[in-house]
Image (spheres, rainbow, N blue to C red):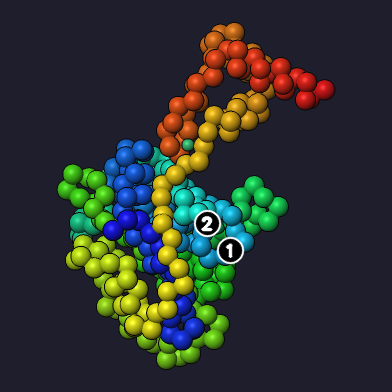
Amino acid sequence: MNDHILIATAYHGEARIYVSYTKDLVEQARSIHQTWPTATAALGRLLTAAAMMSFFNKDDSQLTLRIDGDGPLESVVSEANYLGEVRGLVKNSEVYLKDNKTNKLAVGKAIGNGFLTVIRNPGLKTAFTSSIELISGEVAEDLTYYFTTSEQTPSSVGLGVLIAPNNTVDEAGGFIIQLLPNASENTIIAIENALKEISAVTSYFKAGLTTLDLLAQLASNTQKILFKHDLIYRCGCDKQYYKKTLAKLDAETLNTLIKEDQGAEVVCHYCKTKYYFTATELQTILDHKKTTSR
Ligand code: ZN
């Protein structure tokens, strides 16, 4: 099963359901950032959530989810767009915390107390930022609270990343159910009952079931699929982007890079691609900066 998202209406138009499978993109994030299991789980949950949330509103071109906490991970960031492209990073990738009692990965502990921030259309005129205090740091619970309080859309969120014994990603995926304003009491009860049947998203996939099966379960077989879209880990950076970033440096710093370092190597935080700029290229950036600042 390739990474993808299914978007459906259900319960006779009283709910909307997003279901996603994200194993490959979470594994790619793990491989790029060389994350340890708890860091992989935290990053994977946030990537999966961002991937689904980027399809909420057709007018949004991009979405950023950011968690800042006082736990060892410090911060986790994920970005997604309506093309189904996601990327992310974690401040400290070498975190492997487990709950002593349950033996499960302790994502909440690794994140700690802090804030969840949602930014829609970052960098654009239509940018919108909203922030809440974390409830548990387990991500799905925090997002459920965020949707209900900040977006006034009662929702249920499930996110899961299962780590294989060799520390790669075994399964990953999630769902978001949104109650629409016309939702009846019967629908709310039916959704609550459907949710009780699902212990963990990843165990669902691990049992060989698909996103279609999960959707049918969540929708009590009332689903009408609106569309399906592929999801992929893609950074989208290029040398031109980092040329612009270098142009923001002051002339003194650029001069030092030219004269003392004879060039500069820039590493993208999201995909670890290295871009090399020769002294001549840096000089061109500096000259252009001088002409445009006059
Ligand atoms: Zn990149």
Quadrant containing the C terminus in the rendered view: top right
Q: Amino acid at mark 1?
A: Lys
**Residue 186 image point, x, y percent:** 42, 91
Q: Earlier in the sequence, mark 1 or mark 2?
A: 1
Which element type, helix, strand or loop, lies under badge 1? loop
For image coordinates 66% across by 21% down, the residue present is 285
Q: Position of residue 94 (x, y in %)?
A: 32, 39
Does residue 192 appear anywhere in the picture?
A: no
Q: Residue at x 54, y 86 (%)?
A: 182
Residue annotated with mark 1: 58
Percent x, y for residue 41? Answer: 32, 52
Asked if 177 appears above or below 182 in the picture, the reply is above
Q: Are marks 1 and 2 in contact (CB under 8 Å)?
A: yes
Q: Residue at 42% of width from left, 33% of height from top? A: 272
Q: How many residues crowd around disc 2 within 10 Å: few (fewer than 14), some, or many (20 or more)?
A: many
Q: Which mark is residue 243?
A: none
Q: Nearer the viewer, residue 204 or 3?
A: 3
Note whether ligand 1 is within 8 Å of mark 2.
no
The residue labelled by disc 2 is 82
- What amino acid is found at the position of numbered circle 2 in the picture? Tyr
